Amino acid sequence: MSIIKVEHIGIAVDDIAQSDQLFALLLDRQPYKHESVEREGITTSFYDLGSCKIELLESTRQGSAIEKFIEKRGQGMHHLAFEVDDIVEEMERLRSAGFQLLNDTPQPGADNKLICFLHPKSTGGVLVELCQEIKAN
């Protein structure tokens, strides 16, 4: 079994500082991590809810995927991320099953993860992220 659980729900936001205040109050906890992912042009903020996390995503660069998402749809749910035990194997399985992957190989992502996105056109309109913890050698 490759998909283990829902790892996190990604939420696109205009202003991460303002959204952190809102989500800290809503979730009754502070984020455990802020991280910049320069390759994607985003800053993230993570909240741990035990069995799942919430990831806030703010654009830091004009033309980033998050900026385009917010311009088109406004703030809100951006993606659903699933934890997998072997991302390469899961990518091959899903590609063979007809899903359209947005990456040919796993990419480094936030929160010490390797990631790959699946195109919403092949997943019922939901942007799906696969993620696997990067294991220390």
Image (spheres, rainbow, N blue to C red):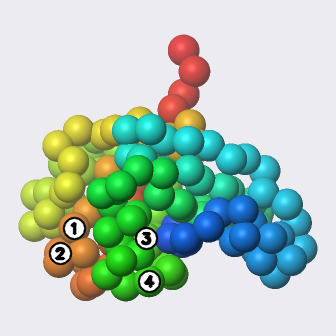
Residue on which the image places disc 4: 74
Distance in Å between CA atoms under marks 4 and 1? 19 Å
Q: Give the residue drawn at x 77%, y 77%.
A: 22
48 to the left or right of 107: right
Q: Earlier in the sequence, mark 4 or mark 1?
A: 4
Q: Which residue is mark 1?
A: 119
Residue at left 72%, top 62%?
17
| Cα distance between the residues tagged 1 and 2 | 6 Å
Q: Earlier in the sequence, mark 1 or mark 3?
A: 3
The residue indicated by pointer 2 is 122
Within 10 Å of disc 2 (Cα), the crowding (few <14, some 14-19, many 20+) is some
Nearest to viewer (mark 2 / mark 4):
4
As displayed, is residue 27 above or below residue 83?
below
- What residue type is disc 2 on? Ser
- Residue drawn at point x = 37 percent, y = 84 percent: 73
**Spatial separation of the CA atoms under disc 1 and disc 3:** 11 Å
| Image: 106 above or below 4 | above
Residue 79, labelled with which disc? 3
Name which residue type carries label 1. His
Q: Position of residue 19 (x, y in %)?
A: 69, 71
> 126 or 2: nearer the eye?
126
Discs 1, 2 touching: Cβ within 8 Å: yes
The span from disc 3 to disc 2 (Cα, nearest Å) is: 14 Å
Residue at the image position 36 percent from the left and 55 percent from the top: 62
Q: Label 4 near label 2: C-beta < 8 Å?
A: no
